[in-house]
Amino acid sequence: MNDYSKQNGSTNNPRGVQGGGSVFPRGFLWGAGSSSYQIEGAVNVDGRGPSVWDTLCTRSGAIVGGHTGDVACDHYHRFRDDVALMKSMGLKSYRFSIAWPRIQPDGVGPANTKGVDFYRRLTDCLLEAGIRPFVTLYHWDMPQALQNRGGWLNRESVHWFSEYTRHVVTALSDRVTDWITINEPQIYINLGHNQAKHAPGLAMSLREQLLATHHTLMAHGASVMAIRGLAKKPSHVGWAPVGRVDFPVDPGSPECVAAARANTFAVDNLGHWNNTWFGDPVIFGHYPEDGLKYYGAAVPKIEPGDMELMKQPLDFYGVNIYSGAPVRLGANGKAEAVAHAPGHARNALSWPITPECLYWGPKFLYERYQLPIVITENGMTNLDSPDVDGVVRDPQRIDYTRRHLLALHRAIADGVPVNGYFHWSIMDNFEWAEGYKDRFGMIYVDFVTQERKLKESAHWYREVIATNGATLAPAGAAAPTSAAKV
């Protein structure tokens, strides 16, 4: 067990959960998350420079409704009220990201004092409320000035990101002990550099996409080194990639489970929807063999020291998991996709709802990488609005979250060390290319008046946190009455 597991009180011992019920390990970190561009607004305030998302939002037709993040949730000016709402929900931790162009308007050079001060105030406010800050350094808002110099295709991006990390760690590590380097590189590489749907809005060759990935992974490693070298307090460092999960429709068959596991870790598509091309270099220091064969000549040249830089010791493996894909054992002994039944439950973005993903995903990832797991994102978008009584009723979100947390609890009971769960998201926000059409939050936001309102899911989640999961127990199950002991 590493120091991170010890501090959180979580364990890979099944005794960390109480038999028959749903109490989570003592010290389990219950949280919710956000990202800077999605909630902060204030894009031209206090010296912040433009990001690639500011630029994309000016492109005609790029964002649903022509929406922008210029105001978003106005969190930059309303963060104290937002933290008060988090406290009322009983959150133990809050995951938020730093806006790189707020710290370095041009992406390089000295830190912008006013930008740094904002995150100091936010962090202090969280600590005063008894909420543990969980900082993400990169959630997609590269400074436009650096994109003009090639962005992630420029090998200098490794140095740029390291310098930026040093500024943030110098400013906040007397307050912050939990760090995530990079969020979902699979998404900004595929949607941003392949499909041109996300910033920076490019449609590049596969070789260029893999080069941007290579530099991203090196930047992650350089960032970890900067945190380790400069942090003023003992730090816990991880990252937050996408979690692709294929789960067996016949969990009683070892062969079906093995096929699902193999598919979960396969590199088999050009959309970068995989775990191992990203995770293996970070944990093992090399790209997976099947990926090298699959990508072939598009794989970028690897310079001496590149892979060693990527592979830096991590304290936890963060992962964002929303759904999974059911598979069965095919006639060839490999996984075969299984279609969902007609009318299968889906969210408002038509993503299938598959709670099994939060059992098999953490299980498979822990088996491969042997690091404690943190669920850094999980949630659903819903068609939420206040009813005639002014109440935002979102029973679908409650049911989604309950089912997924029960699956996660089962993974913990089966020996997977899971240290925390961050619901996505704390509040409705700017949902990237979907603008303000989709609502992921447990807090409703009126984007015209900026009024906030706790949804029913927020009140429900407060009880889950207060009981450390005991209220999740299925009807008829004996719910434990005390916290787990480890």
Image: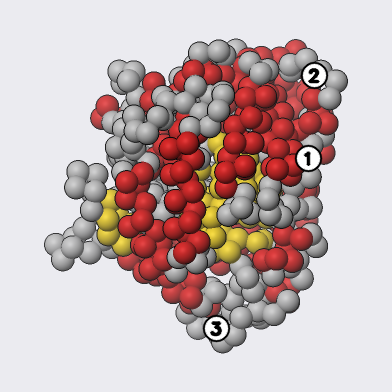
Residue 210, position as x, y percentages in the image: 66, 21
> At 78% across and 40% down in the image, what residue appears?
312
> At 30% across and 18% down in the image, what residue appears?
60
Residue hosting label 3: 479
Task: Please tell me whether residue 484 is drawn above or below residue 100 in the rendered image.
Answer: below
Task: Please tell me whether residue 92 is drawn above or below residue 271 in the rendered image.
Answer: below
* Left or right placement of residue 56 versus residue 356 in this view: left
Q: Are marks 3 and 2 in contact (CB under 8 Å)?
A: no
Q: Residue furthest right?
A: 304
- Crowding around mark 2 (Cα neighbors within 10 Å: few <14, some 14 to 19, many 20+) is few
N-terminal label among 3 and 2? 2
Q: Quadrant of the N terminus?
A: bottom right
Observer-nearest of 153 and 335: 153
Residue hosting label 2: 302
Gap in angstroms between the C-alphas marked 2 and 1: 17 Å
Q: Residue furthest left?
A: 388
Task: Please tell me whether residue 151 is drawn above or below residue 132 in the rendered image.
Answer: above
Q: Is residue 92 visible?
A: yes
Is label 1 in a helix, a strand or a loop?
loop
Picture quadrant of residue 110: top right
Residue 206, position as x, y percentages in the image: 63, 16
N-terminal label among 2 and 1? 2
Residue hosting label 1: 312
N-terminal label among 1 and 3? 1
Q: Quadrant of the C terminus?
A: bottom right
Task: Kindly identify the amino acid type of the residue bearing the numbered disc 1.
Answer: Gln
